[in-house]
Image (cartoon, rainbow, N blue to C red):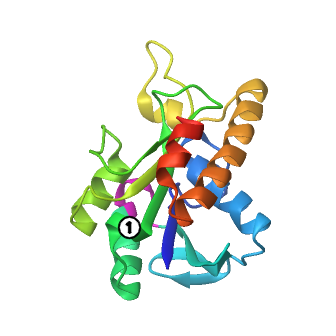
Amino acid sequence: MYIIAGLGNPGKKYEHTRHNVGFDVMDVLAEKYNIRMDEKKYKAICGKGMIGSEKVVLVKPQTFMNLSGESIAEAVNFYKVDPASELLVIFDDISLAPGRIRIRKKGSAGGHNGIKNIIAQVGTEQFARIKVGVGEKPQGWDLADHVLGHMDKADRKLAEEAFLDAVSAVELIVDGKIEQAMNDYN
């Protein structure tokens, strides 16, 4: 079983912002695999289904970004999954241009407060992640204003292409082919 968590902030005002690209990828994944995201558990909106031959639980934490770990830790503990081999987190990265993704098997938070909280709550840095590029903040801008803002049309189009790449990477990762995913998309 795999827990796949896309990070974001709940509520209409945050829909399709840079910080919510994890939610956007979850929506594409759920649609492709006909997974209904209608369960409210683990402080999240969830859906269960199959990707290939692997059972998956898709999770969109509703705790706001900086407390994402509370939700993910609840799901990890409930299903008794090993984060190193059965948890995948998808989130925004300002150091990547829109349209780019980067896959890692593990790592530090890299300044991302949602990941920082997941590491603290789950108790390990050992979990796979897909970072989706949202572009650097313009000089003089507040970081929160940048990540909570919307992309222009050109960047959003690139981001939507990256969502499809992220879904393809998810398929490889749950099939045990993270190295191939990293080679194909990094």
Instruction: Please identify the residue farthest to the top as the structure is shown.
Output: 139
Q: Position of residue 45 (x, y in %)?
A: 58, 74
Q: Is residue 31 left or right of residue 145?
A: right
Depth check: give the residue in front, 170 or 30.
Answer: 170
Please give the residue where the numbered disc 1 appears in the rendered image.
Answer: 85
Whether residue 148 is visible: no
Q: Position of residue 120 (x, y in %)?
A: 22, 61
- 66 w.r.t. 44: above or below: above
Residue sitting at x 73%, y 58%: 28
- Asked if residue 67 lies in the magenta stretch, the reply is yes
Depth check: give the residue in front, 125 or 16.
Answer: 125
Over which residues does the magenta segment extend?
63-68
Q: Position of residue 176 (x, y in %)?
A: 50, 63
Depth check: give the residue in front, 76 or 121.
Answer: 76
- 46 w.r.t. 120: above or below: below
Residue sitting at x 37%, y 77%: 76
Q: Position of residue 3 (x, y in %)?
A: 48, 72
Q: Secondary structure at mark 1?
A: helix
Q: Main secondary structure of the magenta part?
A: helix
